[in-house]
């Protein structure tokens, strides 16, 4: 068992200063791969360092394996940390770097040797054992750093942007290796990153933070498909979600969303009820991902469209930029309703400066309250409908 | 094929292979000559400046080698006409110069060791540990640097005489066992030390002392070397304090011993110079031996890397 529970954890670096982390509550189960994401300065590293014991917790409780750990020494918490800048001891060779923590614990020489070789074998750095860190490449250094965490056989690993110093290709490779290590060891991993791909592919749970608070913590697919609020919706996904301001109109039997340029989009049936009831005549924000915009002739909303008139789901804009991504093509458009981006098949027609009409898949759209910015259809735990 | 050769000729501006080779050689020679001239000028300028700076030192060596009658003449004599070691021999026999040197070595060596130990440990606390009142304490330490030594010398004297350790090695060593300057320098150096190494070691289960011994010291050798040289030379050159607290000839350090050459006999500048040259040698040896790490240490905080 190695469960970590944070209860209303706060961190204030200096008295009178703003909280760097505020009321963070989170339960991390054994073997989970938890990813902290969020804009720079939102408190990800601080949270991680509080779990590690490198920063004192100003307020709140940290429980590990059912024991209160606020004031337990870092070395007694039984966790290993990988730092962004590797933190290798430059005057020791790779072998000694890996063995250092075990030597401190006065472990038997043979056992140390066995573990070092095991970790080195797992990471493919056996041929580097006699070299000093200074002569290694970035990727190799990162492997050594991960290796020195691995040898300790701990149940919890903390990783603070471990791959951010590597180039894209190496990062992809290390990502796969990390996933494999996680699968093999079954250990809990807590991981901070800026990289969307790392977050989506590695995590069993993503924690989105902003200004010291958790905005949403859930499985990657949930975060992507059912964001709790506008911030999470805009932060996760790249390029990010398009947002349009609008007002709910209920002229007759059907509900419509009126955009700022006067376009009327009919709201599909599954969304209409609540919007009609609570938001008639009120301002909301429509969020739609670039891949949910289509060209004319697209086969249709993904089920559940009901009676809604799909022909009303169109929006015209002027193309201001066009990006070829290889398998797909990004169009960036300007319209009176707002700027938006669309991810379309490579064959899509339209050059910069031309007008283009696109269809919004309203069945996959999100509606946010204009004031609170909360997802109107989000329910704690599981999304409705 | 022909279009290809044409293109190549065009690219080379119509020169043939041989012509091109010759041109390249010519250009290279030109550049090389320029570089030689530049280096030559630089060396000449450096030599000139070095001579100006070293002049007092060189002159004292030269005076030390002169018979005393040669010095007091009206004509300009920079170089001894009849060089002699007489002055050195007299300096060594007239006062126990060897004893002075041993004393100085003992005192300066102990002070250096003591300062390195105390300053680096204090600086470790200031740089790596978090505790209440850390900044105030550090300010206090820094404030002591602003009190001139002359202001405290008398009260220090009264203290040590009260302790009854006048005219011993301890009285020479004890008051200099730590220094605010050393703490400051070490702290500055440690601040540029990557904090994550300390944190990583802490997570690995390393105690503070073990961290200092196995990681910090090996990685800050150059700073320690720089501090050692600096402290040693300062201690070697102490004058006021040893003069005040030592009375017997046995406890004299070199700087004071040298002035004894002055008073024992009638004034003999050449004799004194011989003494001075003798006692400069150890500090020069120390400096030359330590200069690499001195320079490395002084500038290592300046550039990341
Ligand atoms: N040692 C410190 N003293 C004072 N304030 C700090 C300290 N460390 C971090 N902060 C502040 O706490 C806030 C959160 O910092 P933190 O390092 O946790 O952000 P982060 O999410 O890791 O950002 P990044 O993605 O840039 O690494 C920031 O506003 C930062 O200025
Ligand atoms: Mg960070």
Image (tube, rainbow, N blue to C red):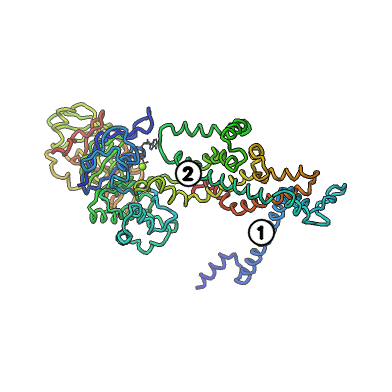
Q: Are marks 2 and 1 on the same chain?
A: yes
Residue A211 appears in view: no
Q: Which corner quadrant of the figure contains ligand 1?
A: top left
Question: How far is the residue under mark 2 from the one under mark 1?
Answer: 41 Å
Q: Chain of mark 2?
A: B
Residue situated in front as seen by the camera: A87 or A253: A87
Q: Say whether residue A248 is left or right of residue A158.
A: left
* Residue ID at (37%, 54%): A100
Question: Around disc 2, counting alpha carbons within 10 Å, would you say few (fewer than 14), some (14 to 19), or many (20 or more)?
Answer: many
Q: Say whether residue A49 is left or right of residue B301.
A: left
Residue A134 appears in view: yes
Residue farthest top in this picture: A281
- Residue behind mark 2: B190
Question: Around disc 1, counting alpha carbons within 10 Å, would you say few (fewer than 14), some (14 to 19), or many (20 or more)?
Answer: few
Which percent across, then down, holds residue B13? 59, 64
Which percent across, then down, holds residue A30? 21, 47
Which percent across, then down, holds residue A80? 31, 49
Residue situated in front as seen by the camera: A112 or B300: A112
Q: Earlier in the sequence, mark 2 or mark 1?
A: 1
* Residue ID at (52%, 72%): B2
Q: Secondary structure at mark 2?
A: helix
Residue situated in front as seen by the camera: B25 or B86: B86
Which percent across, then down, holds residue A95? 37, 59
- Residue behind mark 1: B35
Residue farthest bottom in this picture: B1
Q: How many marks overall? A: 2
Select label 2 or label 1 by which is in front: 2
Q: Secondary structure at mark 1?
A: helix
* Residue ID at (81%, 51%): B78
């Amino acid at each position: 068992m190695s469960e970590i529970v944070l209860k209303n954890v706060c961190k204030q670096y200096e008295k009178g200063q703003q909280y760097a982390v505020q009321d963070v509550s989170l339960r991390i189960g054994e073997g989970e791969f938890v990813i902290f994401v969020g804009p720079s300065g939102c408190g990800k590293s601080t949270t991680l360092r509080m779990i590690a014991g490198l920063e004192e917790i100003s307020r709140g409780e940290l429980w590990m394996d059912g024991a209160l750990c606020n004031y337990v020494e870092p070395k007694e918490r039984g966790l290993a940390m990988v730092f962004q800048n590797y933190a290798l001891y430059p005057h020791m060779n790779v072998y000694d770097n890996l063995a250092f923590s075990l030597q401190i614990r006065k472990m038997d020489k043979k056992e140390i040797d066995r573990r070092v070789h095991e970790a080195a074998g797992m990471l493919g750095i056996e041929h580097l054992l006699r070299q000093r860190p200074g002569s290694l490449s970035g990727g190799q250094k990162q492997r050594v750093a991960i290796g020195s965490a691995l040898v300790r056989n701990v149940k919890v690993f903390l990783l603070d942007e471990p791959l951010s110093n590597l180039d894209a290709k190496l990062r992809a490779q290390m990502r796969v290796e990390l996933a494999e290590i996680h699968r093999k060891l079954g250990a809990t991993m807590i991981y901070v990153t800026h990289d969307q791909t790392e977050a989506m592919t590695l995590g069993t749970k993503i924690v989105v933070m902003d200004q010291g608070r958790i905005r949403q913590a859930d499985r990657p697919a949930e975060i992507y498909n059912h964001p709790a609020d506008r911030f999470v919706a805009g932060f996760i996904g790249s390029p990010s979600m398009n947002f349009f301001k609008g007002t709910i109109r209920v002229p007759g039997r059907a509900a419509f969303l009126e955009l700022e340029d006067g376009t009327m989009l009919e709201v599909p049936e599954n969304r209409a009820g609540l919007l009609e009831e609570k938001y008639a005549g009120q301002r909301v924000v429509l969020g739609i991902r670039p891949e949910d915009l289509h060209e004319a002739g697209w086969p249709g909303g993904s089920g559940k469209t009901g009676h809604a008139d799909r022909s009303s789901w169109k929006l015209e804009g002027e193309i201001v930029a066009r990006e070829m991504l290889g398998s797909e093509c990004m169009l960036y458009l300007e319209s009176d309703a707002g700027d938006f981006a669309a991810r379309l098949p490579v064959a899509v027609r339209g050059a910069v400066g031309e007008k283009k009409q696109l269809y919004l898949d309203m069945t996959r759209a999100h509606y946010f309250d204009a004031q609170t910015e909360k997802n109107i259809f989000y329910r704690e735990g599981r999304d409705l409908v | 094929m022909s279009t290809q050769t044409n293109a190549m000729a065009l690219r080379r501006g119509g020169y043939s292979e041989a012509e091109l080779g010759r041109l390249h050689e010519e250009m290279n020679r030109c550049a090389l000559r320029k570089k030689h001239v530049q280096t030559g000028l630089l060396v000449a300028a450096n030599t000139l400046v070095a001579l100006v700076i070293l002049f007092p030192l060189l002159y004292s060596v030269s005076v030390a080698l002169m018979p005393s009658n040669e010095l007091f003449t009206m004509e300009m004599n920079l170089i001894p006409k009849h060089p002699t070691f007489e002055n050195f021999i007299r300096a060594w026999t007239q006062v126990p110069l060897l004893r002075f040197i041993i004393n100085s070595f003992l005192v300066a060596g102990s002070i250096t060791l003591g300062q390195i130990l105390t300053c680096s440990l204090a600086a470790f606390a200031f740089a790596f540990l978090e505790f209440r009142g850390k900044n105030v304490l550090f300010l206090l330490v820094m404030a002591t640097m602003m009190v001139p030594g002359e202001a405290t010398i008398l009260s220090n004297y009264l203290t040590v005489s009260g302790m009854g350790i006048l005219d011993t090695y301890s009285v020479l060593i004890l008051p200099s066992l730590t220094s605010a300057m050393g703490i400051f320098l070490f702290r500055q150096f440690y601040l540029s030390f990557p904090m994550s190494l300390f944190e990583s070691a802490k997570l690995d289960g390393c105690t503070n002392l073990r961290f200092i011994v196995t990681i910090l010291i090996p990685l800050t050798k150059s700073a320690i070397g720089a501090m050692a040289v600096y402290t040693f030379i300062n201690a070697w050159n102490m004058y006021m304090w040893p003069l005040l607290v030592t009375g017997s000839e046995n406890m004299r350090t070199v700087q004071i011993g040298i002035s004894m050459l002055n008073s024992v006999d009638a004034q003999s500048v050449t004799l004194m110079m011989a003494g001075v040259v003798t006692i400069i040698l150890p500090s020069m040896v120390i400096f030359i031996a330590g200069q690499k790490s001195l320079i490395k240490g002084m500038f290592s905080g300046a550039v990341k890397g």
